[in-house]
Image: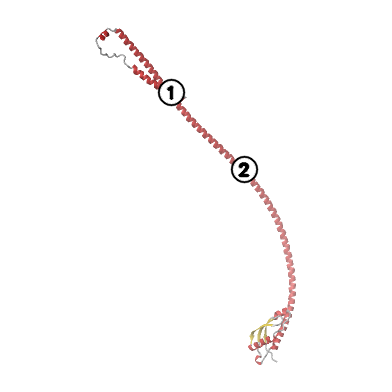
Amino acid sequence: MSSNSSFTIPLGISAGVHIGAIVILALGVDFSSEPMPTPQASSAPAVQAVVVDQQKVAQHVERLKQQKLEQQRKEKARQDELDRQAREATQAREREQQRIKKLEQERKQKEIETKNAAAAAKAAKLREHEEKQKAAAAEAARKQKEAEKKAAEEAAAKAAEKRKREEEAARKAEQERKRKAEEERKRKAEEQARREQEQMMQDALAAEQAALSQTRNKQVMSEVQRYTSMIRATIQRNLVVDESMRGKSCRVNIRLAQDGFVTGSQVISGDSVVCRATKAAINKAGRLPVSSEADVYNKLKEINLTVQPEFN
């Protein structure tokens, strides 16, 4: 509505100004100037003009002057009115422009205020969001600390329980160690006593065995000497001798089976003639005397024997 009125007033002023200009032009005709003389067809009108009442002409001219002055006054008044209206229209237009400018400023100010309010609301919302996040983080941190504290307390309780169990286990282990150490000490003492007793028995048995062995060795050696003599005698019986063998001998190695069978013979050293005769005598005998007793046979199963021919 204000926009239509702002255009209507300037248009009215412009139309008034144009109309006033046309009126001024119309009234600007110089009525005081006398009319141009027109050619007369004859001298009769001129004569008539002479007789015109000069006073009436003067009055008529005066009326015309007055009319012109009145018209000029009215035109001036009208022009003054138009100027006043133009000034008022200009002032109104300026006021309207100021109002429009003010409204535009107010609109811009409102836009700025709206933007500021929106920015403030956004900032407030952001602050609220940040506060919520901080509160949530603080709550999470609090819960985390509570959980850590609870976990630490549980860990401390478990550690205390574990330490208690370990101390109890260590105490029992120490008791067990002492018990085993005592048992080991007793076992070692008993073992030592048993070993000492066994050693005494072994020493006694060894002494007895030594005595028996010595006796048996004497018996075995006696038997070995006896069977060695018998083996030599058997070889001598089968030995073929002659004078060339006198004072000579042969040393041989003889291997015998448990029944006295000769399993092998080998010359160790000596006269070759005597050695041949000795090997021939051994082979001829085929079996030599041995003892049935194992310890005596073990001494005789492989013997080194020196054979020296005997002469009557």
Q: Residues within 10 Å of mark 2 (few under 14, many from 20)?
A: few
Q: Quadrant of residue 62?
A: top left
In percent of width and height, residue 99 lies at 45, 25
Which numbered circle lies on residue 63? none
Look at label 2 and name its amino acid: Lys
Q: Quadrant of residue 278?
A: bottom right
Q: Could you tell whether 87 is left or right of 56 in the image?
A: right
Task: Work out whether mark 1 precedes mark 2 in sequence or the reverse, and give the earlier one.
Answer: 1
Q: Which of the two discs, 1 and 2, sits closer to the camera?
A: 1
Q: Could you tell whether 66 is left or right of 265 in the image?
A: left
- Residue 90 visible, this orientation: no
Which numbered circle lies on residue 143? 2
Residue at 51%, 32% in the rendered image: 114
Cα–Cα gap, marks 1 and 2: 75 Å
In percent of width and height, residue 312 lies at 70, 92
Q: Which residue is mark 1?
A: 8
Residue at 66%, 47% in the rendered image: 154
